[in-house]
Image (cartoon, helix red, strand yellow):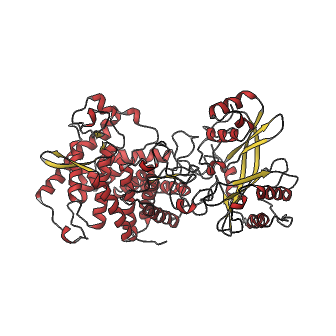
Amino acid sequence: MDFKLANGIERNFYKQDFSVMNELLKRIRHGLVTGENIDISDLDFEGIWDYDQYLSMTYISLFQSGLAPIRFGNRKKNLMMTINRNIEVLRKNKFFEKFNVADENKCRILIEYVIERQPVTLEQLQQEKFDKYRFEIGINGLELKNTKDKMSYYYMPTDATINSHMGLQAAFRLAVSRTPIRQLSDKIPERMKIFKTCGEYEIFKLRSRAFVTYKDECVPLYRGNILYDSFSYETLLEQFIKSSDWLIENMLDDGRFMYYYDCSQDNNKDHEHPNRPLDNLYYNDLRHCGGAITLVRAYTQTGDTKYLEAAKRAIDFTVSISREHTYHKKKAMYVHYNNKGKLGGTGLALIMMMQYRIASGDKSYDKYIKGYARHIMSRMTQEGELLGYYIHPAYNDGNPLTKLTDEERKETFSFYYPGEALLGLALFANHFLKPSEKSWGKNKGKANDADKELVEEVRSMAKTALDWIVNERPKFYKDLFTALPSDAWLMQAIEEWAEDKEFQKPDWLNFVYTDARAMMERCYKKNDSPYIDYEGGYYYNYGDHFYPDGARSEGLIAAYYLAKKQGEEELAAEILDTAKKAAKCQFQLFNDEKSGFSHRNPAKSAHGIRFKATRQWVRVDSVQHVACFFIRLYWSENPVGSGTL
């Protein structure tokens, strides 16, 4: 499907001069402060707002740090009457006095008005196809009109961003909760049942325009967010540096990162572990390592030692949760956390420490690096399969899993852990014996014979593991493979291993190229969806809500570097072009100061990177994946260390 014409009109709308909307919002602020009626008869809204008293439901909302927003909406005979009525009612709100409306740096004002209204039924609404009945979160809203008293209740499109919603179900639940049905039951399923069976409501699907103040500016919103209409390396670098700083600013005293942050609620409650007490919130040792890897890359780009020092603190936390065992009469080490010893936990710890060692020249963690390498080798079967868990509380009474049945092996298999482990081993094999240009005092040292033997053992076993994972894994675990590839860690591992000519086997390289081509195939193009922020977002099936996905994109940029080094220039250029589009799509995940208007604590949320376009959740790995993709993409055409904020 081609939406070129409609998308062109939409893009042109956002290229307009919106100074008239800025002036309107300034006058609204004046009216809110003074209580005086405002005059807007001199303002020309042509091309921006064609007010219709029967269509243009208009809401004004106030936002301020630490406060729940307040809003009111109505539509009168003309726009000026509508605006003044909104101001009048907002000033009567019992929470109005808490807002410092006079200060444009503190109180932000949002105006949103309906531009399209389509009658639908609940059965017609869907989210899988690009047709007139599609409900697109953040783009569409809902009007529920009571057929008896003619009262309407609204879920405006920006409600998705404000309330951190991701789909039709959440939108409908909130819309129904705004009707009198909420007085009949406090249980969501019961409310929905009443709505469906009472037959008293008409449903309309809405579209709107929205503008929000930012200091003395006016920001047009698309999907409740800033619209990024082009790719730029400046934006790429800015978001990378600022999100890296965000990781440091939110580190804990023990070297952990702030694992999870809900911007809409200003709390750290993890949606996957909602019942964990505040003094014992869930933490993940694998994602922890990703945070440190991001900081090492920030040091590599900037040369600022604050990133290296913070990464070292994070590494020290991983050291504190590392345990020993024996492998071939040598000391092996693994990461043990949450009562589990995961292959990926040790693999990522090895990646983290090797990246740190390469960047800093600090060899003080070498015993852990070698211990992790030995542990990973100890978890490989004779055939080459890397086993997912060494410790799991559900198996063998939580003792080491030295012997597994075929059923247990499959039950504890992880799709991503082998790729993480193989990337760690690749960094070890390719860089551990190299003399560093940097050295930290007594840590200089030279490689001994035992180290050389360990590296050769790693190289030998890695060949077996790569053969198995590329050629045999699809046979044993075919149900885990999806149309949209997801094993970006393995793509990065093969890229790193290919630095060694002995690891340039065609089937290994083709695994990366094939997955990259599949990613590019399932990436929205400029005009094959009706939403102008979809370009560069991934999908499993055409029509899916888009996935702005940093994790997969790390695999995509790894494929670019691999193709470039292997002389596959045409493929490399194609991948790079797609990677830029993917990055542009992911720009909208960044919490810019302008876009965080609805966050309960905007100063804290600023510069985090979210999971999704309308979801307001940030996790350490949502930052890591996007940030690490961004900086590797930046380095594709800019020298390491070039560019400043």
Q: Left of 86 or right of it: where is 430?
A: left
- Which corner quadrant of the image does residue 184 belong to? top right
- Which corner quadrant of the image does residue 362 belong to? bottom left
**Residue 212 seen in this snapshot:** no
| Residue lying at 48% horizontally and 48% vertically, measured from the top left | 520
Above-or-below relation of 404 to 637: above
214 vs 103, nearest the viewer: 103
Give the total of numbered labels. 0
**Residue 278 seen in this snapshot:** yes
Above-or-below relation of 498 to 104: above
Q: Left of 143 or right of it: where is 138?
A: left
- Quadrant including the N terminus: top right
| Residue lying at 47% horizontally and 72% vertically, measured from the top left | 644
Q: Position of residue 343 (x, y in %)?
A: 30, 44
Q: Position of residue 363 (x, y in %)?
A: 23, 64
Q: Position of residue 320 (x, y in %)?
A: 28, 54
Residue situated furthest right in the rendering: 77
Q: Left of 529 or right of it: where is 95?
A: right
277 vs 451, nearest the viewer: 277
Q: Position of residue 18 (x, y in %)?
A: 72, 64
- Which corner quadrant of the image does residue 177 belong to? top right
